[in-house]
Image: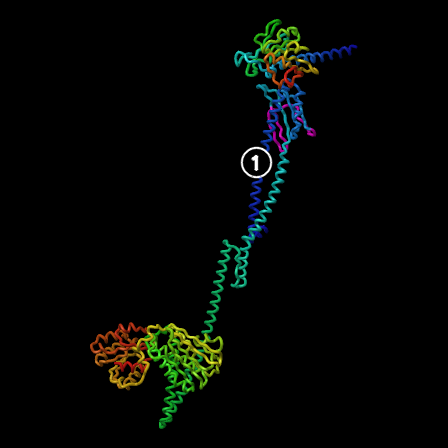
Amino acid sequence: MKRSFTRIVVALLLLAPLAATGQALEREVKAAFLFKFLSFVEWPQGAFARPDSPIALGVLGADEVLDELLRIVPGRVVQGRPITVRRLYYGEPASGLHLLFVGRAAGSALPGYAEREGLLLVAEQPGALEQGAIINFVSVDGRVRFEVAADAAERRGLRVSSRMLSVAEYVRGGKP
Amino acid sequence: MRLWQAIRRSVRRKTMAVVLATTLVALLVNAAAMLVYEVGALREAQVADLLTQAEILGRASAPALAFKDNKEAAQDLAMLRARADIEHAAFYAADGSLFAVYSAPGASGGPPERAQSAAIDVDADRITLFQPIIEDRETLGTVYLRARSGLRERVVGYLGILGAVMALALAVAWLLSLWLQRAVTRPIQAVAAAAREVFERRDFSVRAEKSTEDEIGVLAEALNRMLADLEREMGERREAEGALKAADRRKDEFLATLAHELRNPLAPIRNALYIMQTARDNPAAEAEARAIIERQLQQMVRLVDDLLDVSRITTGKLALRRERVDLRAVAASALEAIEPLARARGHRLSVELPPEGIIVNADPTRLSQVFLNLLNNAVKFTDPGGRIEFHVAAQRGELVARVRDSGVGIPPGMSDEIFEMFAQADRSLERSTMGLGVGLSLARRLVELHGGTIEAKSAGAGRGSEFMVRIPIPGTEAQLPVREAAEPLVSPASAVTQGHRILLADDNQDFANSLAAVLRRMGNEVRVEHDGPAALSAAENFRPDVAFLDIGLPRMNGFDLARRLRALPVTAHSVLVAVTGWGQPADRQLAKEAGFDDYMVKPVEIARIQALLRAT
């Protein structure tokens, strides 16, 4: 009996870091993807004040992802622009932001940011595209993938590279 | 080594070796250069192509790598199926781990597990490269490509083509060398063969075949000309040798004949002397003996004269003393000399002479000698009771004299040879007609000196012969009157040859004394001296009206003596006559300048002296 218990404890001890690792991976992957999206999206003219104005990222309701972004972003440049990341609080407007990631925890706030011109709205919950998100993270076979609402992006003056669309899990609207 | 020897000894092999070696070297160098260039260019192209492929792949699959989409990346790689040369391909994630893999069906091995730094590795068969994928300065991962270069197959195929080309080129070169052989080597070989044949057989009639117009043709022609020259010269040398031998043989025969001829008169003379000694009281027998001596002496004098003439001919000293003479007189003098002999042999002599007044510019003595020789031959070579014709005419600017007889004739083919010195038509020892064999030769030489020709004709042995002399005479002189020189040829004795005071100067005492005796018998006063100074001092007291001076006098020669005599008042107007022995310079001009009035050559004829005395 005592022996079986020991076995279970050992198993649990072995499994615990594994679970933690899975969570850590998802967090890292999503942060990395958010950063990569910047390379494949063109913002409308007037979205930036100057040619070297930074691309502003906002994170709402996903502190782990925020932390990860804050870790990888400093010093990196995309499309010749530096990148800034800030935390967004519930109900706070997305003014000045070029990309907003709304975490699952703040999923209800998603529609509030829809239809905003020049904002790449990214979410991570089922049906997010119907609620106004342009990119939505989905999980396929335990891997992080994403789907894109090309029509919504077009409506908001954003151009998503077809090269990125080619690796999207699902693309709504837009050219086939 | 043996091959090298074989090549060295033959022009044909040399040309072939040169042609083949040149072709081979050119082809090899060309092939090597092409191969190096081709391999380099091929590699470069393949590397560039593979780099481009990697670039395209990286660019197309950048999103897949960025968003970690293995499936998409694998699909991108799968498109490489279209490229049969690519065996393996792979994407590595930014951390260097294998991300997506493609392997061509049937390809062995696979991509390495970990990415490597950017590199291109080319070996004989394959090109391998690692190429980082960079997007927006972010390294997204690495492409790995491994392709068959096919370099080995290309090189093998290339070498195969080169081999075929080389074989073809060598075949063409071979044909070319065969043509060269025909165009160059064969003519050279022909020339060489001709040269070898000449050397080995000493046959100079061999000729090299000239088949080209180039330098070799010139060579062949030069060789042929040289051979022709050699052949001709050898022929000439052989002919000259033959002629020399024949002349030598004739000379030997001549000497034998001469001994006989000189010996023959001696016996009758000795007999005559014996008769004169034993039959003093018999005037008829004595007269007969004198006649014998005179005839035999005459014969000997003629022999010796002939000998002198032979000597003059062989030493080139026979010269003419031309003067304007009547042709009829010349012919008559010859006839006069031959008539007694012809009569003695019982020949019938038929003569036809031109009318008087045909003047020719000739040496009367020599021309007469020509006729006499021909007539003498006719008389001698015709059996007793024969017929002899002598025709002399002047026609169309030519003197034509013909002597025809009914004698032994001339064997066919000998009509030229009989004119050679010492030639005898009949060489047998028992021949009845003796002679020195110089008469005809002398006649021909004399005619030639006159600018004429002489030829012999005969219907054959025993059928008689005919000799024809032709001498050109200028037509304008044909009608000129006779002026001189005919005189000495006529020799009737005359009373006006006496009463002269004559000085004889000659170192030959026998000649001088005998001539003095003759002149005294003619009724002249004669003084004899044997050297120049003595003659000069004698002349002052003796006051000769005629002086015969030898040119070759001791202590003072005849020319000087004549000048001194002319300077003396007592002999200033005397008749001075130069007398020269043969072999001395016979220059009339010189004698005239020294003051001589006349000029005589020994042996001096009494008749000429008589004529001269008559004229003085």
Residue plotted at (57% across, 19% down): B136
Instruction: Report which quarter residue B506 is drawn in.
Output: bottom left
Categorize mark 1 by other alpha carbons within 10 Å: few (<14), some (14-19), many (20+): few
Magenta portion: prevailing SS class: loop
The stretch in magenta equals B105-131
- Residue extending farthest to the top is A91
Pointer 1 residue: B37
Q: Nearer the viewer, residue B451 or B223?
A: B451
Observer able to see residue B318 = yes
Instruction: Report which quarter residue B115 is drawn in.
Output: top right
Horizontal and vertical percent for residue B292? 38, 88
Q: Nearer the viewer, residue B517 or B485?
A: B485
Horizontal and vertical percent for residue B556? 27, 74
Q: Is residue B281 above or below residue B399?
A: below
Three-letter residue code for mark 1: Tyr
Observer able to see residue A70 = no
**Chain under label 1?**
B
- Residue extending farthest to the bottom is B281
In this rendering, would B242 be left or right of A138? left
In this rendering, would A12 be left or right of B339? right
Horizontal and vertical percent for residue B10? 56, 53
